[in-house]
Amino acid sequence: MKKKLLALAAAGLLALTGCSAADVADQNNRTAADNFEIQRRIVFVNGITGDSMLEIEGRCSVTDETGSETGANQLEVICKVGEDEFKKHMLGLSDNVSYVVEQTEANPTDAFHYRFILRPETVIPNVDVKTSAE
């Protein structure tokens, strides 16, 4: 297992070779946001009236599904609202709706350090076993 982790870490280092410090800092910031470590404010604006339609604030991960393989024209926002509690919002986008994602707190990102996060629960599935005795 250690050898596999070291091989993955080495691959990560090779992938980062040739990247600028800004690229590494940007990727670290994205990783922190996807791990609910950064406070954000997401605002949806009506492009015709200029009015704010919706505002979401919290430790949120944002994924723009526009142009993805699914063909969805939406923004997916998942926010951490408790220790093990999350809320997911799917918001449709159109020609006259735009959004702004603001990072409301500074994130101390080290441009010379990469992040490698392994979550065992995603590698080892949670298996429910049913037997004939049930």
Image (tube, rainbow, N blue to C red):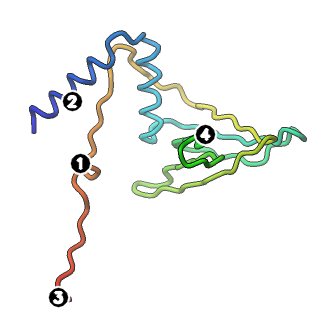
Q: Which residue is mark 1?
A: 120
Q: Secondary structure at mark 4?
A: loop
Disc 4 crowd rating (10 Å Cα; few below 14, some 14-19, many 20+) is few
Q: Residue furthest bottom?
A: 133
Q: Looking at the picture, which amino acid does disc 4 mark?
A: Gly
Q: Is residue 52 left or right of residue 114?
A: right
Query: Given this view, does label 2 or label 1 mark the residue nearer the observer?
Result: 2
Whole-angstrom CA distance, mark 2 to mark 1, is 15 Å
Q: Pointer 2 and pointer 1: residues touching (CB < 8 Å)? A: no
Q: Of callouts 1 and 4, which one flags the residue occurring earlier in the amino acid sequence? A: 4
Callout 1 crowding tier (Cα within 10 Å): few <14, some 14–19, many ≥20: few
Q: Which residue is mark 2?
A: 8
The x, y position of residue 116, in whole percent, is 29, 31
In front here: 69 or 66?
69
Separation (CA) of disc 3 from disc 2: 41 Å
Packing grade of label 2 (10 A; few <14, some 14-19, many >=20) is: few
Q: Secondary structure at mark 2?
A: helix
Q: Quadrant of residue 132?
A: bottom left
Residue occupied by mark 4 = 67
Task: Tell me which amino acid carries mark 2.
Answer: Leu
User: Where residue 11 sits: x, y (%)?
Assistant: 24, 24
The residues tagged by marks 1 and 4 sit, at their Cα atoms, a distance apart of 31 Å
Image mark for residue 75: none
- Give x and y (percent) for residue 5: 16, 33
Q: Quadrant of the C terminus?
A: bottom left
